[in-house]
Image: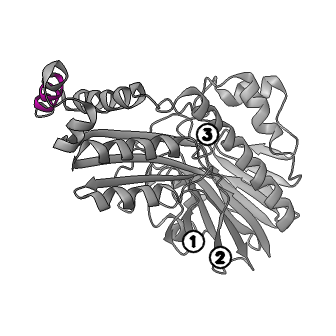
Amino acid sequence: MIRFLHTADWQIGTQFGQFDAEEAAHLAEARFETVRRIASEAATRRVDAVLVAGDVFDQQTVSDTVIRRLFGALAGFTGAWIMLPGNHDAALVESVWTRAQRLNCIPANVHVVLTPGVVQFDALKCAFLCAPLTQRITYDDTTAFFDQTPTPPDYFRVALAHGSVSGILQEGIDSTNPIEPTRAETARLDYLALGDWHGHFQVNARTWYAGTHEQDRFRANDPGFMLDVTLDEPGALPSVRAVPVGKYRWLRWEEEIVVPSDVDALKARLQTLGATDVLKLDVRGTTDLASAEAVRLAVDETRARVRALRVEMSELQVQPTEDDLAALGAQSGYLGKVVARLRDLQADPQQAKLAAEALLLLAQFQREARPA
């Protein structure tokens, strides 16, 4: 029997430029934390190896410190690690991997496979067939050589590759770095560990994507897992269990405000979020100024509770009522003209966002200027 963990697409060094600096720093740090969690789980589960199927690093230009920190994060598991370069960290002549070698920071139990071939573990009676990417983009199937690669007859045949299984994956996947969907069958593999797709996904009984260990985008494709894989004997079907390891949950909400009760429902929903949530919120619809202020206040309170928040309210039309105008003191005079002009500007798609924000700011200034 052999048991291993399958993970991929760590993309250490991701910048998260869509968030502010503090939020981005926490999200980047979580990727190291989850690697340490994988190492701890590997030790606790007493697995024979951890397979990392490509894109360990997000780019070739990560700093030396990031490289050292990544390999330091593996210390919790002293068994075998097998790492494969992917399209983000391809095994170029000069790469993040050659820099790691010069830094002499790769532990002895970590096997970084930079050329296609077989890594054989006689103690485990397992041959790992590895197809690292040696360039970022290729239109040839790098796993084709698996079919003709011999291994000892009583050894497990476990393979690692990074790319897109042809005709299988959902929207948005790259068409480059193709992999034949029948590769496990034609190459007589017990298990094919894949990277590139960021959610864990079963291609067939012997072929799986592990997905990224820590979610990094607003897409509901089951990220944040590692796969715990057991093979009882060569030729037997693998037992695969998805194990959640990710720290943060990324959510994308699209909310439409039509009646005041929609605001109450959104406020209640936002109250359920906490420090492990990353939210992208799109609010649209039409509402009065008081309700729009309530939404903005709820968003500001939520921002203080969640790990990161992106909000888009440009499609929320703010239509002040007579009560709103009275509260603002804007039923006539100069202030009334300003409000009327801002309401008109909301009809212009290019000005709608700024006009809505201006109305909310005006309401805030007027409220704050009133005597206590």
343 falls in the magenta region: yes
Q: Which mark is residue 363?
A: none
Residue 81: say if magenta.
no
Percent of width and height locating residue 149: 63, 58
Name which residue lies at 33% across and 53% down. Answer: 254
Given the image, on which type of amino acid does mark 1 rest? Arg
Q: Position of residue 116 (x, y in %)?
A: 63, 45
Q: Is residue 92 left or right of residue 180?
A: right
Residue 89 appearing in the image: no
Residue 238 got which mark? 2
Give the Cα separation between the discs numbered 3 and 2. 33 Å
User: Mark number for residue 206?
Assistant: 1
**What secondary structure is marked by label 1?**
loop
Residue at left offset 55%, top offset 61%: 147
Q: Quadrant of residue 72?
A: top right
CB atoms of marks 3 and 2 within 8 Å: no
Q: Whole-Å distance between the Cαs marked 1 and 3?
A: 32 Å
Q: On the picture, is 81 further left or further right than 25?
A: right
Foreground residue among 256 and 158 = 256
Of the two numbered discs 1 and 2 on the same chain, state the one appearing first in sequence: 1
C-alpha distance separating marks 1 and 2: 7 Å
- Which span is picked out in magenta? 338-345
Amino acid type indicated by mark 2: Pro
For residue 27, which numbered disc appears in the image?
Answer: 3
Mark 3 neighbour density, 10 Å: few (under 14) some (14–19) many (20 or more): many
Q: Position of residue 30 (x, y in %)?
A: 67, 43
CB under 8 Å between discs 1 and 3: no
In this rendering, the answer to whether 250 lies above or below 187 is above
- Taking the image as shown, residue 232 lies to the left or right of residue 216, namely right
The kind of residue on which mark 3 rests is Leu
